[in-house]
Structures are given as structure tokens and as C-alpha cells.
Image (cartoon, helix red, strand yellow):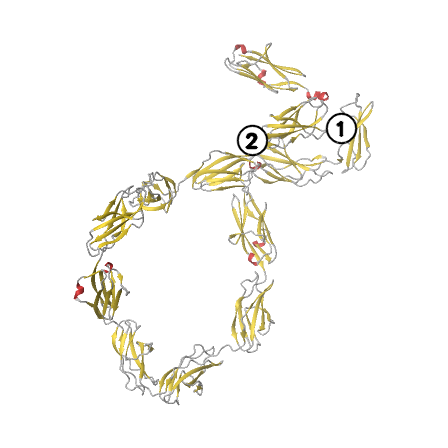
Amino acid sequence: MPLIDGGSRITNYIVEKRESTRKAYSTVTTNCQKCSFRIPNLAEGCEYYFRVLAENEYGIGEPAETAEPVRASEAPSPPESLNIMDVTRSSVSLAWPKPEHDGGSKITGYVIEAQRKGTNQWAHITTVKTLDCVVKNLTENEEYTFQVMAVNSAGRSAPRESRPVIIKEQTMLPEFDLRGIYQKTVIAKAGDNIKIEIPVLGRPRPTVTWKKEDQILKQTQRVNYENTATATILTINECKRSDSGQYPLSAKNIVGEVSEVITVQVHDIPGPPTGPIKFDEISSDFLTFSWEPPLDDGGVPISNYIVEMRQTDSTTWTELATTVIRTTFKATRLTTGVEYQFRVKAQNRYGIGPAITSETIVANYPFKVPGPPGTPQVIAVTKESMTISWNEPVTDGGSPILGYHVERKERNSILWQTVSKMLVSGNIFKSTGLTDGIAYEFRVIAENLAGKSKPSKPSEPVFALDPIDPPGKPIPLNITRHAVTLKWTKPEYNGGFKITGYTVEKRDLPNGRWLKANFSNILETEFTVSGLTEDAAYEFRVIARNAGGAVSQPSEPSDAITCRDDIEAPKIKVDAKYKDTLVLKAGEVFRLEADVSGRPPPTMTWTKGEKELEDTAKLEIKIADFSTVLINKDSSRRDGGAYTLTATNPGGFAKHIFNVKVLDRPGPPEGPLTVSEVTAEKCVLSWLPPLDDGGAKIDHYVRESTRKAYSTVNANCHKTTWKVDSLQEGCNYYFRVLAENEYGIGLPVETSESVKVSERPLPPGKITLLDVTRNSVSLSWEKPEHDGGSRILGYIVEMQSKGSEKWSTCATVKVTEATITGLIQGEEYTFRVSAQNEKGISDPRQLGIPVIAKDLVIPPAFKLLFTTFSVLAGEDLKVDVPFVGRPKPSVFWHKDNVALKQTTRVNAESSENNTVLTIKEACREDVGNYLVKLTNSAGEATETLNIVVLDKPGPPTGPVKVDEVTADSITISWEPPKYDGGSSINNYIVEKRDTSTTTWQIVSATVARTTIKASRLKTGCEYQFRIAAENRYGKSTYLTSDEPSESSGAVTARDEVEPPHISMDPKYKDTIVVHAGESFRLDADVHGKPIPSIQWLKGDHELTNTARMEIKSTDFATSLSVKEAIRVDSGQYVLLAKNVAGPVEITGVTAE
């Protein structure tokens, strides 16, 4: 209806339409009597503009037009279903399909509403443009029903309801959906990209980890995995054979954990066959060789091998075979003597792999010529012939020895002659036709099918002479455990030349071979054979050799000889002068001599004290088989003493002690020089007499002390202790003591370290038990009250088991605390601590009570001083939460009743006795209540921490409400910001804008409440308002009113004037009865525009505040209270409310 009717009643309205693609309007009706009209016969889907004109008796007015075109359509059909997709303890995920019909207009969105069980009211949740929605902030364990409506330009569809659902956390054991992976195996060709995507089920969302074999999978640019909301994806780019293997994966949530193993097989061409290539058979025209299969078959079976060959004088390879199935091959039709090389490749269905190449090899007989025979030995000689023998070659070359060729030459010739007319089948040969007196050498050559060997080494030159007679039979002179001394007679006939030497041979009985027993030439007819075995039986024989080179036949063997000692115990004989002590002066020479007997000859040693003496320039020792002498030059005092000669053989031993006394000055007193009873100004020295008194009685001792130069303290001390007085406190001193006898003053004994004039420290202070476990105890203690004048070097901790009297040291430390480990669980121990300085160890301080080694069980408990923490926005916050608990508690963090999600910005770390929450660059999202929970076997504890991020506030909460409009003012109100920035709101800043301009003007910058009356407005002007909140940290963004407000003045007076209205509790309709002395109160709500004035009356009198009566009134409420009522308070009470629309009153009665 028009605001201005032109002074005459509106008679009718004219409605016109036009299509949006046309410019001209067409009339729909000219006689519409109401303010609404249904327009039929529109083309579905077309867009139209509409306008309406009012008409009275004076004519047709200006039109009112639609600002935007309207599509001719109807509301869409509802979605077919509303599905519950997911439920948590505070949210529900919904999804639905598109409606079957959109009503002829594009669906612009969907409206979601919810209804809680037990109510009939549907609450608007949100409007979305997608086909799904997550409804949050629901109440746990409540039952809800949801409905969705499709919206197009024509309106909303009918609602589609969901099934009722109870809001609670859904849990489900993790599960992998492996239906897309056949037999849990993925096969790929090398070089391909592998992508394995496995759907993952489970509530809450499981954590998925991958491994390669038994190691956590190391993610690289080529190999990595990604976990999405519904799946885990393993990606291997350009896969290799090394990527093959088992890939275990596991999914874990609070319900449990499941594991699966995916096998990845990467196939490729095979690797090279495994070498080396072995030649199994070699002949003159063929070769048989073999190899091993490749270590890497490429992941599929080897189908065949390819064999190639080349002659070494060529670089061209020739294929011999391409379909070899086995790992052996025979190469035929080879040329004898030619050198060949072979190579082999493996092939599978993916291709041919690299080759392995053999060593070069010559096609020839499969055996070689023999090795050379052993060096020939001449075993018999005459002046016309020699008989030789030799050993077979070490190797026959692979073919049996057919025989031997024997060659001979004269010693001075270089020409070898073959003397065997045919192959010699054995290894003995007799060479005849020799010239008397000439020396000959022999060598031997072996022959097999491959040919002749190299010659053996030549034999020793031997003269062709008549033989020498053998020496006489050997006779033993001396037999010991390991040696036999033999004697024999010369040969009766020496062969015409002088005997130049003998060879002795031995053999073990009963069946040993004859072996040479001497390794140098024997000139005499006596020799000792050594290196024999005790209790073994031997025979010996001797062979003679003359200057002509002739060698005799061996002698007759000796009788059997068993190696055992002929034993006679040692004896020592000395001159009578050595029976007494040998006395001499320092600087003189003394000589000790003795004769020794025994069988076998004894071993002699000289010792002094426990030390064996050796031959030196000063001390000369001579030892023969049966005598010895010791000579000492330039004797000194320390050369005196007992010299022991010991003679030993298997029969026993003998000793003789020679006593020697050298007279001299005394030696140094026996140390150490002990300093005791050290105080601030004195100490006691003690020592022992010299080990060497110089051969004379010690008269007295000389004591000296020093700071830099020694000074004599006492020069006539006859004891081995002395108290030194008058020392300077805190100074370090050295002391020395010298002995004196009739020959003079001896060498000093000194203190090795300086002595500080101080004393032992006092015991440590109080000992505190810090901690106990089943195998350890931790202690601390206080320092001693006095350190004795010297720095404390450390502390000694001792312990004593229950039932034991023994204290054992269990720790030595430099600090005032220690942890003792290795205790036995359940055992009871006592501990004590001693302090130590350079003067010694203090008396111990004992722990007052015994300790039982067992794990402490302490319920978790917090040690927080406060529970609210604040931080400026953008800065870092570290919240340290100390606690106690044994065993170490498990720590859980929650934020706003949800497990804290750890990120690089927000994370928590825990140790034995604290947990630290770190928040980097704090922001508004970090505000809230954080619950810390500690649990161990002894119990649990929780603490709620409040974290405040200090920031400027969020905008005030809309919408901006227009509470009152007058001709020159508008009263608006709003709600405080949802986020106050961690600080109370100081004030609000309200600005206005005349909608005909773009300029904002401040109404007030110091508004304390959430309402303001904007005055001095222009009647008829349209205004828009915006409000910002301000705290100590800054100003928020603005909340702007949605639509302009018009100051309408008298035109809208009827809408803005409302008569007073009073509402009261029905109980005030009846008489209120109270007892004297009691109190009563009358309450009422008052409404009206403008705000009414309020009066309370009793009878004809207006009531005011007194000592017993109190009246409180606000814009919209009032109350009257009377304390300790008396009779005169009875009667009628009238509440009168008045404004421009009129008065209203309510009367009530009280009675006592």
C-alpha cells in the first residue's frame, strides 16, 4: 500500500509484466483490489519483471517495480533421502542426493534443521550449497532428528527427515580393504611407477605406518607414502629390483591395531650368471664348462642361457647357442692349440641380462708334462760303476709316469749325456763304464703322454773309487734325557785317501727310517746327538768319507739306547775362608769362588736377595762346567749382603751362601717418611731405621724442614719419631731425615709431596634420602661445617646390608649427591658418608634410618602454583607443569574435551617429573581449557589449565537490533563479542552513516553498554550503523547493521507508541498475608513506548524509600520491598505506569 494515497482512497491496483528479454510491459490486470495477486500462464523457466501502479479518483500513480527479474518456477521436490554418514561425540555428518526435480529453477542451496528428542521445535542449523554437511556442537548422548530442504528461487522444498541418531563417539577396530590387491601382491616391471592405494577403515581414524621388511620405511622423493582421510597410498617411482620385498603396514587407534603385509615384486632382466666359469673337461678339440645361475633372476624364472665364444686374436664374439637350458655347455669343433674365451648371458621373459666372461683357455690335451723328479742320491760306488736312486715327481701332470731318462756328466764338464738306453721303469739305476778317480754327477727326467719333464737337480759329485771300509760300531759315552754322546773307531782301510769327515745317522726303534743326525762335518770320532725324546729307544750308525770323495758303507748299528739321565746330585765345594762373613771397606774388590760336581753337569746361578745376578762391567761372573767365580769391583755399602750360588740338575740342587759386609756411611732411613697429627702449627714425623746401617750402629738422626731451602729442625734425635713445632698455618712444607753413624751422615729420606699444615675435615652435614627404586638409592648431603683448612677432594659413600657388620664403599664422588645402584630388591641397607681432604677422611655421617630397596609407588600429583596462563597474540608460550609420581606417569593432554592434536606449532613433551606444553605464535584458536591427565599404577590425577591469548577482541555479536525509532533518534542494541581477546571490553565505538553518503561519523567512542540512543537525526533520513568493541589490546573489526534504518517521525508514530503494560505473578492477585516481623516484596514487569514513568502509591500517598521500605525501578521492571512488616504496612498498594499513550495501574492488598 502506498505511504501517500494522494488525499483520496486507493480504488484499485494495475499489475503489469514483461519478459526480461523484452523492453515493453504488458498488462496482467487493471482491477486488483488487494495488495497481492496471483499471475497465471507464465512460461516455465522464463524470467519476468513485474510492476504495480495504484489508482484513485484522480488517476494512476507511479509504479513500484521488482528490482531483479523473477524466474517462473516452483519450489523443488525434496531430496530422496537424508543419510547419516558419521557420528562423533559432538557432531554428525549428513549427506543427501539431489532432488529429482528442481522446480524449473536452479537449486541455490539446502537448509539443514535439527530437532532434539523431547521437543517439537525445529532449529535452523545452516544453509549449504553442497550435498553434505557436518553439524557440530551437538550435546553428547542426546538423540536428534535432522531434516533437509532444497531451495531455489521459488522457495523451499518439503523437508526430508533423517532417522533419529544418538550423539556419541563411534569406535571401530582398524581394517584394511585389500580387495583391490590380488593375493596381497603387487607385481611391476623395473622402471614403472607403483601406486598402492588401500582403503583404511576404523574409528577414530587410525594412524597408519609402513615398513620395508622390519625397518620403518624411509621416505624419499622416489619412495613415499601418504595417508588420507579414507586411505593410505604407497608410491614407488621408477621402481628397481631392490624395491622388491615385504612391506608390512599397520593401522592403530584406541580400539586396537591390525597389520597386513603387502608383497612387492619388481621384475627385470636377470643379472649376470654367477662365476667364475669352470672348465670341467679340456681336450684338443672340445671344452666343457659350467657356471652357476644368476644371484638375481629378475624375479621370474630363467628361461635359457646364451653362450658366445671368441678367439683371443679377434674381438668378434660368435654365438654358439641361444637356447641352453642347463648351466653347462660343451663347445666342440675347436682347433688344437688355439686360445679361446667364452661368455654366458641369462635370459628371462623380460630380456637378456649382462654377460659373465671366462678366463682365456687353450684347446689342448687335458694334462701336462710331469714335474721334475727328486734329486738323485748315489747309494753305491766302485771305481767302475755307481748306483743312484731318486724320488718320483711331486706331480705327474695328470697322466701316469711312463718311465725315466738318466743323464750323467763329469764334474768339470758342461755336457750331459743320456746313459739309459730305454725308459727306466723304477727309481734305481746303475751306471757303468766309469773312469777310476773321476767325479760324476747324475740327473733324472720323467716322461708321460704329454712329454718329458724338466730335469731334476744334479746329484752331489761322487768319485769313482773303490769303497772305504765302514767305521767301527758306535759306543755311548754319556746318555741323558735328550742327548747321547757316541764314540767309534776309524775305518781299517781309507780307500787310499785321507778320511775327511763322518756322518752320523739315527733311527727310532723299532721301525724308524735312518735319518742324518749331524748338520755340520764331524772331524773327530766322537759326537753328541741332541734333540732326542726322553724314554725313546734309538740305534745309531756312522759313515766315513775320504778326500777322494769315496763314501763308506754304514757301520754296524749301535746297541739300542734309551734316553734317560745318568743322575748324580750336585755338590758345591768352597774354601774355608768363605765359611765366615767376608768383611771389606767401601771401594775394595771381593772375589767368591766354588767348585761344583754332579751328573749331568749342573746348571749354576748366582742370586742376591730374590734377583738373579748378571755379568756386568762392575760384577763379573765366570761359569765353567764344574767351577764358577764372582768378582765385584769398587764395592759400596749396597754390595754387601748374602750371595747365593745354586747348582741344579735332575738329581737335585745344592746351595751355598757367601756373606759379604761392606763398611760405609748409613743408607737413607726407611720410608715412607710419614707426617701425622698435623694441626695448625705442628706435626709429627715418623720413619724406620735405614735398611743399611753402613755396618755400624746408628748414633742419631738429623731432621730438616724446608720452604725453599732445607733448615735443620734437630741434629741429635735418637728415636724414629719427632714432633715438629712452630709451623706456619696454611703453609706447605717438605721434610727429610738423615741417619748418622761413625762413618758419617747418610742419604736423606724425603716426603714425596709437600705437607700442608691442616687437618681432617669434619663429617658431612645432614644426609637426605632423595629417591629409592628396587635396585638403587639416591642420597644428598650437606658440606662439612669445617674443611680442616684444606679443600674437600671428595666424598666416600659406604653401605651396610642388614645382618652384616661390614661397611663397603659403594661410591666415591666429588659432589654432594650420589646414586647407588646394583642393590638387591627387598634388602634393607644402611648408608653413611665421609668427607675427604688431602689430610685424610673425616668421621662418617650416617643416614638416620635404614632403607629398603624397592620401587616407590606414588600416585600422580601436580605441583602447579597457578592454573591460568596468558600470552600476547603472536608470541610463544611454554607451560611447564611439574608433577610427582612413581612409576613415571603417562601424560595425556586434552583441549576442550578433545585429545590435543600435536603439530609443529602446538606440542607437548614429558619427562620423569614434568610435562611442557609449547605453543608457538599463539593465536585465538589456542584459547580454551586444557586438561592434563596423569596415570600410573597407583592412580591418576587431572588438572585443568586455562590459556588466555591476549588480543584485540572479535567483532560484536549481531545482528544489530533497532529497539526504538523516533523522529530524531534511533535506539540500537547488540550482543558482546563472542571472543573478548582475553581482556574485558573497555568500551564500544558506534558510528553512523547517512545512506546518501559514504562517510561514517562517530556517534560515540565511549559506549560502556551494548545499547545506545543515536540522537539529533534528521527526520526522513535513512541511516546505517556499525559498532566496534575495544579492549586494552586494540579495536575489533566492525559489526555493521544489515539494512538502513529510517527516522520516520510522525508517519510511524503509531508503530512506535505503545501504552504501558504491567505484568505480575498471579499470586499478587490475591491478598498477600505475612506475619509481623517478616518481610514481603512486590515485583512487576513494565512495558511501553516511550518508556513509562513508574509510581508506587498507598492510599493517596506516593511511596518513597525509607529505612524499612526500598523501591527499585529500571526501564522495564520495578519492585517494592518491606522489611520487618508491622500492622501499619497492611492495606492497598497501587503501581501506576504512565506515558504519552496513557496511564495504567494495578492494585494489590496486603494483610498482616
| Residue highlighted by disc 1 | 36
Residue 380 showing in the rendered view: yes
| 787 to 14, vertically: above or below | below
Which three-letter amino acid code belongs to the residue tagged 1?
A: Ser
Residue 1085's place in the image compared with 125, above or below, is above
Q: Nearer the viewer, residue 1001 or 919?
A: 1001
- Residue 1069 or residue 486, whichever sits in front: 486
Tag on residue 663?
Answer: none
How would you rate the neighbour count of disc 1 (Cα within 10 Å): few for under 14, some for 14-19, many for 20 or more? few
Residue 375, percent across and down? 40, 80
Element at badge 1?
A: loop
Q: Is residue 967 above or below residue 908?
A: above
Q: Which mark is residue 983?
A: 2
455 lies left or right of 148: left
Identify the image quadrant of the N terminus: top right
Taking the spot 42% from the left edge, 83% from the top edge, the residue there is 443
Left or right: 895 with respect to 472? right
Count all numbered tags in the image, as a single digit.
2
Q: Quadrant of residue 955?
A: top right
Residue 727: image x %, image y %?
Answer: 28, 43
Q: Amino acid at mark 2?
A: Ser
Q: Residues within 10 Å of mark 2 (few under 14, many from 20)?
A: some
Q: Position of residue 412 (x, y in %)?
A: 41, 85
Q: Is residue 358 left or right of residue 428?
A: right
Expressed as whole percent of the image width and height from the top left, the position of residue 950 reads 56, 34
- Residue closer to the observer: 327 or 582: 582
* Residue 203 position by quadrant: top right
Quadrant position of residue 612: bottom left
